[in-house]
Each structure stands twice: as C-alpha cells, then as structure tokens.
Amino acid sequence: KLEITILGAHNLESSNSRMVSILIDGSLALDAGGLTSGLSLDQQGKIKAILLTHQHFDHVKDVVSIGLKNAYQPAIQIYASEIVLKILSEHLFNGLLYPDFTIWPSPEKPSLKLNVIKPYERFEALNFSILPLPTNHAVPNTGYAISKSAKTLFYTGDTSYGLKECWQHISPQLIITELTGPSSMGEEFFQRTGHLSPSLLKKELLEFKKLKNYLPQVVLVHLNPEKEDKIGAEIDALRSELGISIIIGRENMKLSL
C-alpha cells in the first residue's frame, strides 16, 4: 500500500498554494517545490530520498532547505538525471547562496548525496522499485513509475503531449500528472512551453486506453491557481466523458493506493 500526500499542487506560491511536491509513505519525495513548507520539522526528518524531475526552480526550491535541516543526519539521497545534477551543482550547490550540502557539514558526512539516474534503467530506493521515463517538457524531464507491493503510480513531472512511449513501459493504477492551464490558452502555447491542458490530457488518456485497454485514476498537479475555475469546468466535462476518476490536487490531500 502506498500512502501519498500532495504537499504542493500548484505552479505559483501564495498563502494557500505551494509549488509541486509529493510525498510517498512519509519518506520518498517527488520534486521539492513545496517540500519543507508543507511539512513539520519532525516530518522533514523522516525524508530519506528525493526524486527530481528537472531543474526548474518550482521543482527544486526546497532542496536547500531540507539540506540545512538534515545536517549531521544520514545523507538524504537525491536522484536525478546527469544534466539536472550538473545544473544543481553549478548553480545551487556552489557555496554562494547556501553551503554546498553535498560536502557540508563535512565531505565524509554530507547532508545530501547526489545519484545519477538514467532513462529506462530501473533502480531501488528505500523499499520502492523506480523506473525513470523521459517526458516532453521545455527542458529534459524525467517522469517516475514508483512501485511497491504490486501497486504502481506514475508521476509525469512537467510534460506536454507525447507520452505514448511512456505508456508502453508501465501499467499504473494511478497517474499523477501536471495540468497547467485551461485549453483556451491554446494548444501552441502548451506545446511550446511543455505543459498540458485538459484537451491535451484527453488525447493522452485516449492513447493510454488504446494501448492498455483501461484508464487509471488521475490526479492533477502544477495547476495555475489563477485559472483553476476554468480548469475545473473542463475537467468536470472530461471526467464525465471518460467515466473515470480525475481529481484536482490540493495542498495536504492524502491518497492511498
């Protein structure tokens, strides 16, 4: 059984919205946009590993905060692609804005440890089996299929239309995907910026059903909070049309799989 908490469900931060971060079983985080701001200090102390999809700030912001909190504890394992870790090392873990948590408080016992992942190469972290899969975004992005005890969720990270290759490798019970704005913003905008709208999500889900002959539960994150009313109306229609559960994610929402 997977216990999932949506810590941050939006692409903007405010008094009632946090940037994207998802917590599984209290110990594995997916992205770190709203990680520490969504947890107590005791809860932060239970995080053992973080999977990062890409380097955009709304997905990595709280990595430095958790690094500071984790001083003098066993290193938190950070997993990401080589390019993401290179960018973080050069721009975030360079000792200019914060200590370099990959060698602080000491090189022998750092707060954070960086681990390179490769597309399509499954690895184990904590008690999870994890399959990294590339998705389509404005910069290289890695989605993650996370499995435990015959249960699998797939987290896309930021992505636009074109997940068919991913669908060929996984059969999840739950998809947590981004959905940034309403379809009225125009398909060209979403393709150019590497994001999804309800109309593009519909295409993705129909591709999934054609390939797998079923549709999983869907949870949406990375929503623009200023456009949620329009998004919600479109998702209501899509939910009825497809006859499946499509949930708009909220901060502190809890799910079990």
Image (spheres, grey):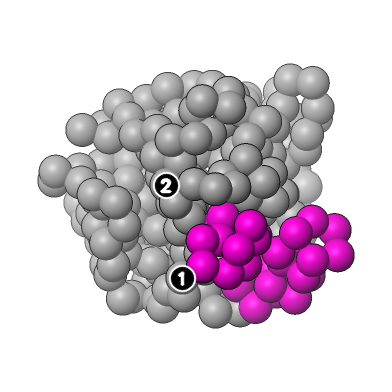
Name the residue: 41% across, 78% down: 118
Q: CA distance from mark 2 to mark 1?
A: 13 Å
What x and y, as percent, mark residue 164? 39, 67
Q: Amino acid at mark 2?
A: Lys
Name the residue: 32% across, 41% down: 174
Name the residue: 20% across, 46% down: 148
Of residue 109 and residue 2, the one placed in the foreground of this image is 109
177 is higher (above) or lower (below) than 195? above
Q: Amino acid at mark 1?
A: Asn
Q: Is residue 134 left or right of residue 180?
A: left
Of residue 118 and residue 171, the one placed in the foreground of this image is 118
Upstream in sequence: badge 2 or badge 1:
2
Residue 210 in sight from this viewpoint = no
Q: Report if the CB atoms under discs 2 and 1 are less than 8 Å apart.
A: no
What x and y, as percent, mark residue 115? 46, 70
Task: Count residues near mark 2 (Cα–Cα under 10 Å), then give few for <14, some for 14-19, many for 20+.
Answer: some
The residue at which mark 2 appears reads as 48
Q: What's the mark number on residue 9?
A: none
What x and y, as percent, mark residue 52? 54, 58
Residue 22 in sight from this viewpoint = yes
What is the span of residues highlighted in magenta in the rendered image?
84-112
Q: Quadrant of the C terminus?
A: top left
Determine which quarter of the picture holds residue 190: bottom right
Please tell me whether residue 111 belongs to the stretch shown in magenta. Answer: yes
Q: What's the mark number on residue 115?
A: 1
193 is higher (above) or lower (below) than 23? below
**SS for callout 1:** strand
Q: Main secondary structure of the magenta part?
A: loop
What x and y, as percent, mark residue 255? 37, 25
**SS for callout 2:** loop
